[in-house]
Structure formats: C-alpha cells, structure tokens
Image (cartoon, helix red, strand yellow):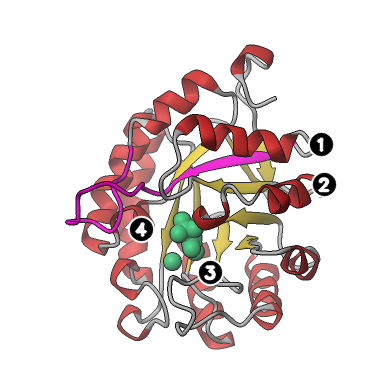
Amino acid sequence: LANKKFHAQPSIVTVGNARIGSDELVFMAGPCSIESEEQVFTVARALKASGAQILRGGAFKPRTSPYAFQGLEEQGLKLMAEAGKETGMAIVSEVTSLAAVEAAYQHVDMFQIGARNMQNFYLLKEVGKTDKPVLLKRGLAATIDEWLNAAEYIMSEGNHQVVLCERGIRTFETATRNTLDISAVPVVKSKSHLPIIVDPSHATGIKDLVPSMSRASIAAGADGLMIEVHPTPATALSDGAQSLTPQEFDRLCRELLPFANLM
Ligand code: PEP
Ligand code: MN
C-alpha cells in the first residue's frame, strides 16, 4: 500500500487546512512538551502569526530516563486543543499506548508515532484502525525499508493517511544528537507515494543547526518541517537546547518561504 508501484501519484494528506504532499510547504511547530496554559498559548499565537499551519506538542513523553518529565497527558492535550481552536491551527501530538490513542482522539487532528515506537506493531495497528492522519517518525536505527513496512502496518488496517518524518538516525557521530539522513527524502520519494517531512530539531539536537538543515531538507524535496519552538528555551522541561524562540522561528519562516516556493 505504501509502495509507489501500486499508487504512482504522490499522496496528499490533509490536516486542518494544511495539505501535506501538495505544492505548499507545511510547518509543524511547537514545544517539545506542553508545560502550561501560558506556555502553549504564547507559543501558538506566535507560530500562527509566523505562518505555521500545525501546532505540535508532547503530552505523553517517552523520555530516555523514567525520572525525566513525562508530560501533562490528557490535561496537556486539552490545553493544546484550546490553543489550536483559538488560533485556527491543527494539532499533532504523540501517542504511546492504546490508552493514549483513546485519550487523544477527541483533542488532536493527527497522531504522532515517535521514533521509539516505530516498530510497536500493536500501536501502529491501533492508529491504523482510526480515521485520523498519522505522522510516523523514523526509528532511531531503522532502515528505510523497515520504516516503510511500519507505514504498511498502519495502512493495512485501512488508514492510508500516513506522513513520514525523518528525524535523524543513530550513527557513530557524536557532534550532533542524531545524524540527519537527508538522502532519506529522495529515497522515500523514489519508493513511496507518501509525503515526507523532516524534523531538524531532533535530528541535530542543536538549535543553531536548525536553519541550515531546514534549507537542506527543502532542497532535497521535503514536503514540510517539524520544528521545536519554546517561548523560553532555557527553562524548557525538555529539549531546550534544540528549541528556537518564537522570534527565531519567525526569522526562519521568512527566510524559507520564498525558497520553498522556488522548489
Ligand atoms: C518528539 O517529536 O516529541 C519526539 C519525542 O521525537 P522522536 O520520537 O523523533 O524522538
Ligand atoms: Mn523533543
């Protein structure tokens, strides 16, 4: 189902008023974690003004350490849904279990499957049984074929609205948090009709690298970007080092939009 052989035309996945996989460049932006009402509303209003179409934010956080902040769960989803309603932005948030899928269903416009769950086949099938679009992140050490097979698990249950997200893979290099596999974009385009976006924030872990890797992603043919933005990155409960301020995000959008239209 994910293979281009069976579906030659590129697929377009609609989330709110964003059409992922069409000519437009889609920006998903927001904090790593939803932390408070003030945080999510402040960031959502700024992102909307900059032109982002989709608000991201984690409420169920699969942290590397069990002692790190685990997220506000359903309370966080409610806050994000309210911010989305006020600003007119669609919502994407990660789900980590069947209970999370059930809790998130009424609040989000798109489910996110995180890198650590890319081969949680049970979870893939559960989101595959729903009618909401799914953002499927590449696993930390997954090949492109394994990733496309994960998409197949979702699609085989009837839900064909899958968007892939390259977010860097584990290599021997330690200068960046992960290694952004830019070539995954054209490789996926050659094998599949599904849209693909890039997350330069998790791919690098370093906010100063986000603008250059965003440009590289667009040049390689990405359909959109997922970027972490926090009103005060220094006090963020997760991923502050890779988060842009709303002002930095605004500057990046202005720089990328004319470039995006040329691709
Ligand atoms: C995220 O986007 O919040 C996240 C946890 O990313 P990843 O699953 O790519 O590590
Ligand atoms: Mn994060």
Query: Which region is colored magenta?
Result: 160-181
Identify the residue position indicated by label 4 in the image. Answer: 201
Residue at the location (70% across, 54% down)? 123
Q: Amino acid at mark 3?
A: Pro
Of callouts 2 and 4, which one flags the residue occurring earlier in the amino acid sequence? Answer: 2
Tell me which corner region of the image, top left, top right, bottom left or bottom right, holds residue 143: top left
Label 1, residues with CA under 10 Å away: few <14, some 14-19, many ≥20:
some
Q: Amino acid at mark 4?
A: Ser
Q: Is residue 41 left or right of residue 212?
A: right
Label 4, residues with CA under 10 Å away: few <14, some 14-19, many ≥20:
many
Mark 1 vs 2: CB contact within 8 A: yes
Q: Nearer the viewer, mark 1 or mark 3?
A: 3
Q: Is mark 3 within 8 Å of ligand 1?
A: yes
Tag shown at residue 158: 1
Residue 239, horizontal then vertical, whole percent? 37, 72
- Image quarter for ligand 2 equals bottom left
Identify whether 103 is placed above or below 260: below
- Cα–Cα span, label 4 and label 3: 16 Å
Q: Is residue 15 left or right of residue 116?
A: right
Mark 1 vs 3: CB contact within 8 A: no
Q: Nearer the viewer, mark 4 or mark 1?
A: 1
Q: Amino acid at mark 2?
A: Lys
- Cα–Cα span, label 4 and label 1: 31 Å
